[in-house]
Image: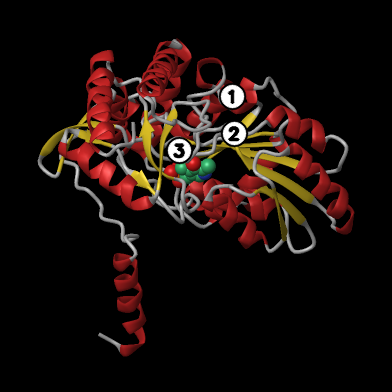
Amino acid sequence: MANSLDWIKTELESLKEAGLYNQIRTLESPQGAWLVVDGKKVLNFCANNYLGLANHPRIVKAAIDAAEKYGVGPGAVRTIAGTLNLHLELEKRLAEFKRVEKAITFQSGFSANLATIPALVGKEDVIFSDRLNHASIIDGCRLAKSKIIAYDHCSPASLKEMLDQHRAEYRRALVVTDGVFSMDGDVAPLDEIYEVTRGYDVILMVDDAHGEGVLGEGGRGIVDHFKLHGKVDVEVGTLSKAFGVVGGVVAGDPLVVEWLFQRGRPFLFSSAMTIPDVAACIEAVKILESSTELVDRLWENAAYFKAEMKALGFDTGVSTTPITPVMLGEAPLAQKFSKKLFEAGVFAMSIGFPTVPKGLARIRVMISAAHSRDDLDQALEIFKKVGRELNVI
Ligand SMILES: *Cc1c(COP(=O)(O)O)cnc(C)c1O
């Protein structure tokens, strides 16, 4: 090994010492309410598979049928190899679902942010960003080379103060926020943010990764939830969470979408979503459009689980969505809690610094429509047992 890489060994060692080295579990079964993890059958509370679509028979069949008809790979980037009719169909269906004129898909939500932010603002511009925004927003902002000004988490007042102080110094401005914050499960006050931004010349963007398929009528997302159609310029979504597949989407003002087809770098320089993924996503949209049953069940499950956890004496934080943090405080306690849950048959990860602030370590429980009432009751029993053993409740 070259000496020039020795530093990596040192860094890896220090991650291990600090308890921050990612030990990734191996799954031997499809995503669902139950998993086989490292050979053991456990209840799954880790996935963003909110609606249980990751292994839905109709979606699996759509992917197989498309692969048989069109193959697997897209060949090259769409601007060079041409665009498959299936990609256009998905974009048309997503636009209809989101009640906008146009949508564009990307390989992931992450690349949707990397495409969108630098296409809209540059060196002479300013970005106002919620302090707790997702890493892919932060990276998109860095690539844009704009001045980045963080405002206080979910605070329209702080945003207004920053706009007053700084907007005028720059050419263009972007205000960007997560829709649902993934660690706490709180929802950005997008209606108030919109009201604040009205007084200024700014582009308003929301990354609704955890709200897509979850918030709004039948899972149409945060813009629908707040009835802000036509008022939010850019709505980024992911097809990898509630949609159960993989991919990213930008919906919103048709000018923005057209611009991204021309200037979104991950669109221009990276190949498109694979064909089975696209077909699977089309089927997911169809399922969401045909009924609100899965979205309704997700929210019923979340309400039930949260209420029962509170009744047991757990602190479930400030979440207003199916993301259910179980607040524990120090990271070693959260790690120990997660380990004991796993031994008792519940797979739920502990999350500590730097993903969340020091002293706010937690178990993050991800509720899904795939869970039956019996699954939730079994999990509640196990949480009760471990909570008592560790003197948390
Ligand atoms: C998960 C997430 C992403 C990344 O989405 P992928 O499709 O998995 O790349 C982007 N933004 C936010 C806010 C997310 O929570």
> On the image, numbered disc 1 is attached to which residue?
98
Q: Secondary structure at mark 1?
A: helix
Q: Viewed as shown, does residue 2 lie left or right of 258?
A: left
Find residue 263 and report its horizontal and vertical position in percent: 64, 52
Q: Secondary structure at mark 3?
A: loop
Please name whichever residue, 62 or 9, is drawn nearer the observer in this view of the structure.
9
Q: State yes or no: discs 2 and 3 in contact (Cβ < 8 Å).
A: no
Sequence-first tag of 2 and 3: 3
> On the image, numbered disc 3 is attached to which residue?
84
Q: Quadrant of residue 316?
A: top left
> On the image, numbered disc 2 is attached to which residue?
103
Find residue 147 and report its horizontal and vertical position in percent: 74, 61
Q: Looking at the image, is mark 2 or mark 3 nearer the viewer? A: 2
Q: Which residue occupies 30% across, 31% down?
A: 63
Q: Which residue extends farthest bottom?
A: 3
- Label 1 crowd (10 A; few <14 / some 14-19 / many >=20): many
Give the colour scheme shown.
secondary structure
Q: Quadrant of residue 16?
A: bottom left
Q: CA distance from mark 3 to mark 1?
A: 22 Å
- Label 2 crowd (10 A; few <14 / some 14-19 / many >=20): many
Find residue 49 and report its horizontal and vertical position in percent: 36, 31
Q: Which mark is residue 176?
A: none
